[in-house]
Image: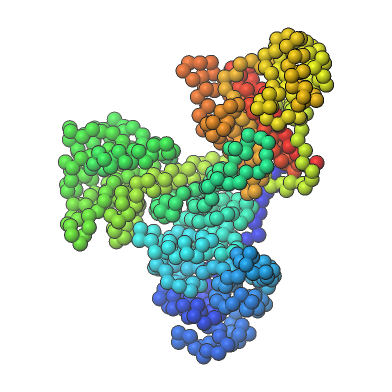
């Protein structure tokens, strides 16, 4: 397909800023806190406070200005007012500093309150020049690997040898995440603030390059750059370091002014999910899911498949696991015959063997029998093996038998080489010291069944994406600015027919009498439509199965008050299923293609899938296969199946048309695309195209 561009990002060298050996701090209270936090974390480099009046801060000599510093700093924390921030950033850039965190607020985020806010942010970016800056309006960053902080507040992160990087636009969310007690080792915690110059993706790329970082998590309100996201995805795949995103904004968004049905299916959040899936970037829905997914990715990376096993000593827990996986991509596959034999030997005759498995309490407290049972389950070629285990309160209870179970899981994982995770149904029941112990042994300490299933689904989706060739670069064509026009149905179909989309034989008529004549020449039965009318069915401008000259003329006269021209078409045979194929322009991804149940079902079922562009026939097949109407195409309840191959090729031809006309096309709608019985093709019964002149 034509019209795609290789995307690049203007990422900046952030190494000195996020891994500094020397730090300059500007300001009073905030500067003192930065020094305090660096000292608590054992930062081994030099810290140079800069203050116009104070002689020392936290036992360190104060310098009066940037020019007085003993050397060029790798990083700077600028904790002064917004106007002075611009001056200091300019001075740091002039001496070649490695970068700066701009703490002050009152920039673009306050544009509605401060008249000069936007201009001041532009001035800050200009002052920085080629020197990277993070913010403004942000807390900065914590490097838990080297104990380097540009962070003016308390936090919960300790030193780690390796771990994950977490990035967010929200400083308060960052503080909350730093306080987690789930055993997740955090190598970097970074906030981006206004992203005036350096975006989250640029920061994520810099963290990804650190060999001590295992995975990256982003909490975003909106992506700073689609191009940067593409580069982040490519590098993630190359390094085999997964990236997972928590993107807010699932609520209903305002729709574009549109006359098509496509907009009812293609919301901005759905497009974001499609973009992330195409790029092999995972997506989670909540902060707990983000943390649990990062734990799994830290220990194991992307999963090789979506096949899981689960064991618990309670039928209730087994049911909770099964229910959590219902409707997800997770597959609790059947047990192998050899597994059943070994499980029966270790668990006895009274246990019902299944997956998820309730192993009862017959082996409770028996290390050897538990080890044998767990090893038997782990030998099933599952990508992840779960054991549900809530530890008791150690201030009131004896946890010896629970520790025996943990030891048995660890031993079984070692025996088989399988990946295992222990799942506490309640986060309170996975003590941090136990989580850290499990992590050290290569066992994933999960908190929450739903979060565990979500984490496994994301990790397996990333693994599946990496097993395929990388997707083509996303379509990157700027639309032209011009007057919007809507083609009539006849002209729209002519355009699409030229790209290989099958349309009914049709003719335009200027009067009821001419419509009847054209119908006779096409051959009855025919369909009659009023041209230039939006939503023709609702307007009474469509008549089907007209069987003679008189019926056509009468129908045309009936719609003459609302239509000056008529489209006469040969009737299409009864379809097996109807599909909507539409393209609409999204603020993030540009033009995207939407597939869904067509005809009257489009808004009733909301059964849809989104394809980012350019696309391929295998991707189209995967999208169609995700729809509920795929059962109709396959031949539901022994009914005649539809022409799937022709449908895929028609969608591909439509996608080609969209790509080739991306600069001018605003919207496209085929509704319905009639999927005829196998071997008879797929025909666009209606078409709408809106484009810029």
Residue 416's x, y, as percent?
31, 44
Residue 70 shows in this picture: no
- Look at 73% across and 16% down and name the residue there: 555
Residue 315's x, y, as percent?
25, 39
- Look at 57% across and 19% down and name the residue there: 576
Quadrant for the C terminus, please.
Answer: top right
- Look at 51% across and 79% down and name the residue there: 31
- The answer to whether 375 appears left or right of 645 in the picture is left
Quarter of the view holding residue 113: bottom right
Q: Nearer the viewer, residue 565 or 348?
A: 565
State whether residue 609 is above or below residue 44: above
Quadrant for the N terminus, please.
Answer: top right
Quarter of the view holding residue 487: top right
- Look at 30% across and 56% down and name the residue there: 428
State whether residue 512 is above or below residue 74: above
- The answer to whether 687 appears left or right of 48 in the picture is right
Q: Nearer the viewer, residue 482 or 420?
A: 482
């Amino acid at each position: 397909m034509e019209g795609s561009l290789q995307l690049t990002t203007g990422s900046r060298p952030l190494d000195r800023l996020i891994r500094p050996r020397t730090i300059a701090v500007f300001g009073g209270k905030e500067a003192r806190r930065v020094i305090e936090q660096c000292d608590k974390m054992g930062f081994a480099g030099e810290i140079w406070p800069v203050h116009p009046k104070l002689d020392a801060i936290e036992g360190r000599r104060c310098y009066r200005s940037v020019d007085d510093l003993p050397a060029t700093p790798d990083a700077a924390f600028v904790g002064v007012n917004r106007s002075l921030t611009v001056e200091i950033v300019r001075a740091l850039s002039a001496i070649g500093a490695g970068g700066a965190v701009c703490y002050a607020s009152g920039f673009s985020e306050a544009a509605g309150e401060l008249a000069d806010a936007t201009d001041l942010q532009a001035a800050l970016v200009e002052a920085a020049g080629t020197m990277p800056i993070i913010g403004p309006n942000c807390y900065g960053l914590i490097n838990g690997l080297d104990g380097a902080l540009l962070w003016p507040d308390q936090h919960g992160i300790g030193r780690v040898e390796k771990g994950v990087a977490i990035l967010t636009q929200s400083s308060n969310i960052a503080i909350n995440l730093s306080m987690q007690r789930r055993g997740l080792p955090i190598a970097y915690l970074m906030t981006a603030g206004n992203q005036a110059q350096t975006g989250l993706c640029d920061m994520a790329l810099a963290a990804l390059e650190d060999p001590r970082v295992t995975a990256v998590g982003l909490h975003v309100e909106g992506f700073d750059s689609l191009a940067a996201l593409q580069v982040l995805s490519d590098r993630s795949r190359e390094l085999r370091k997964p990236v997972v995103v928590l993107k807010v904004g699932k609520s209903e968004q305002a729709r574009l002014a549109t006359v098509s049905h496509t907009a009812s299916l293609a919301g901005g959040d759905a497009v974001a999910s499609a973009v992330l899936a195409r790029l092999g970037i995972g997506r989670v829905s909540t902060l707990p899911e983000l943390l649990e997914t990062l734990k799994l990715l830290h220990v194991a990376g992307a999963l090789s498949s979506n096949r899981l096993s689960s064991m618990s000593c309670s039928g209730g827990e087994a049911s909770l696991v099964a229910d959590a996986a219902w409707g997800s991509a997770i597959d609790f596959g059947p047990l192998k015959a050899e597994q059943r034999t070994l499980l029966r030997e270790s668990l006895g005759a009274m246990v019902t063997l299944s997956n998820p498995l309730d192993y009862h309490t017959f082996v409770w407290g028996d290390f050897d029998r538990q080890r044998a049972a767990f090893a038997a389950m782990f030998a099933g070629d599952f990508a992840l093996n779960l054991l549900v285990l809530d530890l008791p309160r150690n201030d009131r209870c004896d946890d010896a038998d629970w520790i025996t179970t943990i030891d048995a899981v660890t031993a079984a994982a070692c025996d088989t080489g399988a990946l295992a995770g222990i799942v506490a149904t309640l986060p309170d029941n996975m003590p941090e010291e136990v989580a850290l112990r499990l992590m050290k042994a290569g066992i994933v300490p999960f908190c929450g069944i739903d979060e565990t299933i979500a984490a496994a689904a994301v990790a397996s989706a990333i693994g599946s994406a990496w097993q395929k060739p990388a997707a083509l670069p996303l379509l990157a064509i700027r639309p032209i600015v011009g007057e919007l026009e809507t083609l009539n149905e006849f002209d729209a179909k002519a355009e699409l027919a030229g790209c290989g989309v099958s349309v009914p034989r049709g003719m335009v008529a200027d009067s009821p009498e001419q419509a009847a004549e054209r119908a006779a020449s096409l051959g009855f039965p025919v369909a009659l439509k009023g041209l230039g009318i939006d939503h023709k069915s609702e307007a009474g401008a469509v008549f089907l199965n007209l069987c003679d000259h008189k019926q056509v003329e009468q129908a045309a006269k009936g719609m003459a008050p609302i239509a000056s021209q008529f489209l006469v078409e040969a009737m299409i045979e009864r379809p097996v299923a109807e599909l909507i194929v539409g393209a609409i322009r999204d603020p993030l991804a540009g033009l995207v293609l939407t597939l869904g149940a067509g005809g009257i079902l489009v808004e009733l079922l909301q059964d849809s899938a989104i394809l980012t562009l350019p696309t391929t026939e295998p991707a189209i097949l995967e999208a169609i296969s995700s729809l509920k109407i795929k059962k109709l195409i396959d031949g539901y309840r022994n009914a005649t199946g539809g022409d799937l191959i022709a449908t895929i090729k028609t969608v591909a031809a439509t996608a080609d048309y969209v790509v080739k006309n991306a600069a001018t096309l605003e919207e496209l709608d085929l509704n319905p695309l009639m999927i005829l019985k196998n071997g008879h093709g797929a025909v666009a019964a209606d078409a709408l195209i809106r484009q810029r002149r």
